[in-house]
Image (cartoon, rainbow, N blue to C red):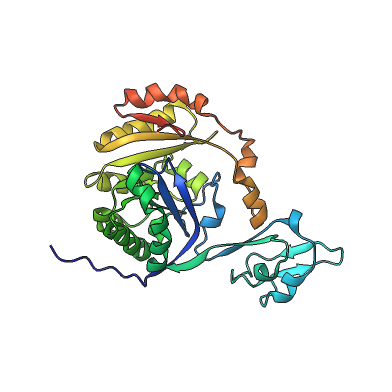
Amino acid sequence: MSKITIDYQAEGDIFDIQRFSLNDGPGIRTIVFLKGCPLSCWWCSNPESQRRRPVVMYNAADCVRCRRCESACQRHAVTFMDDGRRHFDYQACTGNGDCAAVCPTGALVMKGRSIRVGELIEILKKDRSTFRHSGGGVTLSGGDPLMQPDFAGELLKACKAQGWNTAIETEGCAETETYLRLVPYIDTILMDIKHMDPEKHRLFTGVSNELILNNARRVSAFAPLTIRVPVIPKFNESEEEIRAIAEFAASLGKVRYVHLLPYHSLGENKYRMMGIEYKMNRLSAKSLSNKELEKYRPIVEQAGVSCRIGDES
């Protein structure tokens, strides 16, 4: 077997690192959130992940209107009106962070930075004893980590070289060849299947589900999947729609379980901070509880696959 080469200088864009996670693969895990996503789901709790470039988020409540950001921005994306109100042109913003760097109150927050594989591995090494004792490891999430396939691939290889368990959380919308190329370096694949109807999927996420379903079929032939289903009011919150997803999961043959995740609106404030609409408000959707999803457990199990709900271990 040929020796695996790893490019520790490979560079990618991330927006967060979350430690001590219990629901994103086996054991205690550290999650690395990569920027970029092909979907724009109405309920997305990380809208800052959708753009590949860094984004600036603005919390108006913390702004003291000192106007330092206006002076720092060379693109004139930040202006103040005569009445003191601040206007932010998100289209003009390049995300270079000049405005956030001079903000004295933290009203401006940068989400996203470039990092090399080697630098990231050194950060992750801080948790290696936790990985060893808990059977955990590193999970790549996003966005969708496979929107940066070369960086994700080198990072996965580097994690395996450390002896760490690896997992990815994916929307299933990358090129099929990307999945097949990276499967040897992934221990756990968590793939979202949100709906079986391509048009309804397109309406609520911006893309059809055809590539996603095809990827699930192809990838399951090489590696077991966990199918994740965010249960969303007025989108897929019905017995018929959950049954259709469960039956599809059962048809794949190599599915560990279907994981039902209750809708919540915890990311709504991020939309205000980015100056974009939180579309779920159009539906007057209310958050769901784990208890409310229990009615779907027998439906999933009758289809022939195991079911997890919420934060069950």
Placement of the C terminus among the 4 image quadrants: top left
Q: Check the image and name the residue furthest to the right.
A: 83
Position of residue 167 measured from the top left corner of the image (x, y, whole percent): 34, 49
Query: Residue at point 61% right, 45% down?
Result: 279
22 vs 71: above or below: above
Q: Check the image and name the residue furthest to the bottom.
A: 74
Q: Is residue 126 left or right of residue 214?
A: right
Q: Quadrant of residue 152?
A: bottom left
Foreground residue among 88 and 61:
61
Foreground residue among 122 and 205:
122
Query: Residue at point 45% right, 44% down?
Result: 21
Query: Residue at point 32% right, 51% down?
Result: 166
Residue 223 seen in this snapshot:
yes
Residue 277 seen in this snapshot:
no
Position of residue 91 measured from the top left corner of the image (x, y, whole percent): 62, 66
Q: Is residue 308 left or right of residue 1?
A: right
Placement of the N terminus among the 4 image quadrants: bottom left
5 vs 30: above or below: below
Query: Residue at point 27% right, 44% down?
Result: 217
Position of residue 285 measured from the top left corner of the image (x, y, whole percent): 61, 35
